[in-house]
Image (cartoon, coloured by chain):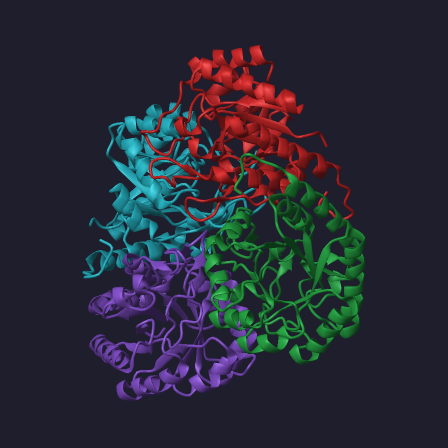
Chain colours: A purple, B green, C red, D cyan
Amino acid sequence: HLPLTVIAGPCALESRDHALECAAALKEIAERLAIGLIYKTSFDKANRTSAVSPRGIGMKAALPILAEVRDKTGLPVLTDVHESGQCAEVGQVVDVLQIPAFLCRQTDLLVAASQTGCVVNVKKGQFLAPWDMANVAGKIRASGNDRVLLTERGASFGYNTLVNDFRSIPIMARKADCPIVFDATHSVQTPGGAGTTSGGQREFVPTLARAAVAVGVAAVFAETHPDPDKAPSDGPNMIPLIAFESFVRDLVAIDRLAKNRVSLYDFA
Amino acid sequence: HLPLTVIAGPCALESRDHALECAAALKEIAERLAIGLIYKTSFDKANRTSAVSPRGIGMKAALPILAEVRDKTGLPVLTDVHESGQCAEVGQVVDVLQIPAFLCRQTDLLVAASQTGCVVNVKKGQFLAPWDMANVAGKIRASGNDRVLLTERGASFGYNTLVNDFRSIPIMARKADCPIVFDATHSVQTPGGAGTTSGGQREFVPTLARAAVAVGVAAVFAETHPDPDKAPSDGPNMIPLIAFESFVRDLVAIDRLAKNRVSLYDFA
Amino acid sequence: HLPLTVIAGPCALESRDHALECAAALKEIAERLAIGLIYKTSFDKANRTSAVSPRGIGMKAALPILAEVRDKTGLPVLTDVHESGQCAEVGQVVDVLQIPAFLCRQTDLLVAASQTGCVVNVKKGQFLAPWDMANVAGKIRASGNDRVLLTERGASFGYNTLVNDFRSIPIMARKADCPIVFDATHSVQTPGGAGTTSGGQREFVPTLARAAVAVGVAAVFAETHPDPDKAPSDGPNMIPLIAFESFVRDLVAIDRLAKNRVSLYDFA
Amino acid sequence: HLPLTVIAGPCALESRDHALECAAALKEIAERLAIGLIYKTSFDKANRTSAVSPRGIGMKAALPILAEVRDKTGLPVLTDVHESGQCAEVGQVVDVLQIPAFLCRQTDLLVAASQTGCVVNVKKGQFLAPWDMANVAGKIRASGNDRVLLTERGASFGYNTLVNDFRSIPIMARKADCPIVFDATHSVQTPGGAGTTSGGQREFVPTLARAAVAVGVAAVFAETHPDPDKAPSDGPNMIPLIAFESFVRDLVAIDRLAKNRVSLYDFA
């Protein structure tokens, strides 16, 4: 088992300066903790709760910035795509293409992402059982790309609430035979729960991340921001950048222990 | 309150002959029952459970057939779209553009559908609370089109199971101020429940449709097929065409009663 | 199929005068509508949300009042029991013993209720699948009593929320082979949702009751009160007595239609 | 924070010899691992899925055996009660009285258990939100006993399925201000899922237990048996006794780390 990787960054790409600043800060944290880190940011919030929510700077403006972040920091970069036509172009400047949870069964999008040759990270739909993600990974592999990640980010639990079933981690790992990511910040969303935006429960991020790492995951995904309460999206669930290092340090310690345990009686 | 309309047809557009045959049969039923009927069929099953499931004849082959069905039968036609780029072209040959449930929050798709001027029918996401559909209707109206329908088709209830919360009908009607459709055949899907396809519980279609009509809906959506067990998709939940007329006749009787009742104590 | 019966009354037995007054009013409504009516009231709210909630007048004080209501009005009477030791005594003054939903799997209570020879109405647990209620009915029958009713009153749906799956009505009817009751007022509870009490959504009672009757039930259970907002329990979901007759009149009309329909294609 | 305690034993008290043998084996494991251990067993399975399931040896036969286990091994003993009348007598031979999840809101039972002066461990109902357990703890405290434990054992998630929401651990700890137990073996039940018995997913017990300990709990509850597949109840989810020590050793290591972490950003 490889040691824990972290996928982190602000939810939305706000500007060139903001992106470079966040990426530099995260790179320093990763170096101090001696962990792998993938920089995450989005150029378009394509499924906002309402029409009045801001969407982001758009693909054309974003691609040169993503390329510059990758070049300047040396960090691998991840971003999400929303329609099949975006994949080829975006795939040229990032390392990981991410498929949003609502879109995890859109065959054309999965195939187009697969064909870029990038790593493809698919978030499990809030409406899907973990065993059904094997078919999703299969759509990507059938298009010739075996570099698939699957991400747990919560299942619908009544209205405006998500729950993480941690059985999903071993289930997806075994059924889809690929590394599993835990998305700690979207798992605490209260979707639509704040009227025209989604709410969030930032205080539960460490709780759920620790649980996931103790179960055993390849990576933790966590959005972070210098000032979450002023962020254009997902502010209520992002981690303040100032707290990010101690948050990750705890996870690294648990990860080391979890991956070294020897158990006669286990799912694996 | 207008009398009940029915939206019906085979899940997938299988061929020109099949489509014309089904549409002619449904037109006869609608005339005998003196109800409005919208012909529904799909040119692409864009989010099949797995890569091995058949997807359909595709948009290019389908559009002339949809146009011919509309011309020959005089029935209004409904079909679903999956990416924003499809809307303008598809909107020229149909009366209603339908947004699939998984895609009900994709802003670009909603806006593009809205701008065609067609009626837009959005299926409520399995992951959404009914009150959150007001924001979805708002995205369409903000693009200049007020002809919105919202469809109840089940909410995620644990794994591989949907449940209809019939409170969603008055909630969506009031919050989004638009006609509500009940999708009786997708509501009995067991998503992903049959391994590489979705299962279905055809036997509960009349149960749920009667409940919805008694609550009060503008339309019932129900897929039907001459031979469901041989259909390329959704066979387990479609109604055999031979049983369709008696199914609808029951609903029409309940609808007449439901819309004529006078109640001092009600949600309306 | 027998015509619809109504089970109605105030949630809690507040006093002799209150009980006699409510029962007389309900008897008049039942006579005007020519329907069967069973008077329902509880002597003990044994599982209130918190220790500060009032519990009721208790069994000893209640039994003579229940007997008097039955004698004076001629209405059959239903009340609920909470421990096995109560059944024999309570069973002497009522016609129907009701088992609360939380207790629907307590074998001793079911057996003791069964042995009274009363009709036993078991509410489906919020945590149980409808098909599992066949085992519950089996516990009663195995103790020598075949007069079982099963009641749909909602399933847990996330936190503080219930949802009615109307498939449960035909499923329980077939699997347990007994008449099914729909509890329209507890189905709109928001359990624990008001801090130290349960909330409720009175405005959805007619919606859900109409749906249940259209599906086909033997009886509708609905709590009613002259002044719900002053009731000691379940006020937020009870129907004002003044609106009860028009509420039931609608249901009777739908019931007549639902039970007369002939459908070639149905669950039955 | 005190180090992790384990609550363990076979689901049902099968016989004097079986109980003494299991308790002796568990005592040895606890000594080798230097942890606190409470012996758990039940004299009556009072809410079995169906009437044909065995219920146990009964209270009268069990009490002397429980007393003997406590005397001979020196282990504290826990057992569950089902009706208020049982509490006083059972409370004389055990250290912890446990309230089953279905009964967690039965006021009389909670009060009677409270009045014994024993520690009272209440399992969170499958139908309850974690914040609502504060009212349950309040019922016990209002009766003069402050020694309350609350146990997470899963929430209803669709039909025949439970899910653990690990946010419940910090929520209950804060709202009810008491130690929290994680029940690792009942959390993997598939209630009613095996027809006339509950099924179970033993393979997920270590996954969920590790997650709970990483979050931070006072105790893990886990049923174990020398030969689970021959046990009269809960066999599918019990841990084989032979694997118990390595299972607990992993948890102890994670617990030590979890309780020593210092985090600037946390729920506590």
- Residue A3 drawn at (x, y percent): 32, 73
Q: Is residue B258 above or below residue B59?
A: above
Q: Using residue B108 as the reference point, say whether residue B27 is left or right of it.
A: right
Q: Position of residue A30 (x, y in %)?
A: 24, 77
Residue drawn at x 39%, y 69% as measured from the top left: A181
Identify which residue, C253 or B179, lies in the foreground: B179
Q: Identify which residue is drawn at 68% across, 50% down.
A: B3
Residue D78 lies left or right of residue C66; in this view the side is left
Residue C50 horizontal/vertical position (percent): 34, 33
Q: Residue at x 26, y 56 (%)?
A: D255
D205 or C41, nearer to the observer: C41
Is residue D228 in view from this perspective? yes
Q: Is residue C260 left or right of residue A27?
A: right
Examine the rendered structure and indicate whether residue A243 appears above or below residue A34.
Answer: above
* Residue C146 falls in image quadrant: top right
Left or right: B212 with respect to C81?
right
Q: Residue at x 45, y 53 (%)?
A: A157
The picture quadrant where one finds residue A75 is bottom left
Return the residue nearer the eye: B169 or C233.
B169
Q: Is residue D75 visible?
A: no
Seen in the picture, residue B145 relative to B131 is either above or below; the reply is below
Q: Locate residue A216, reporting x and y percent.
A: 36, 65
Residue B1, compared with residue B145, is above or below; it is: above
Q: How many marks?
A: 0
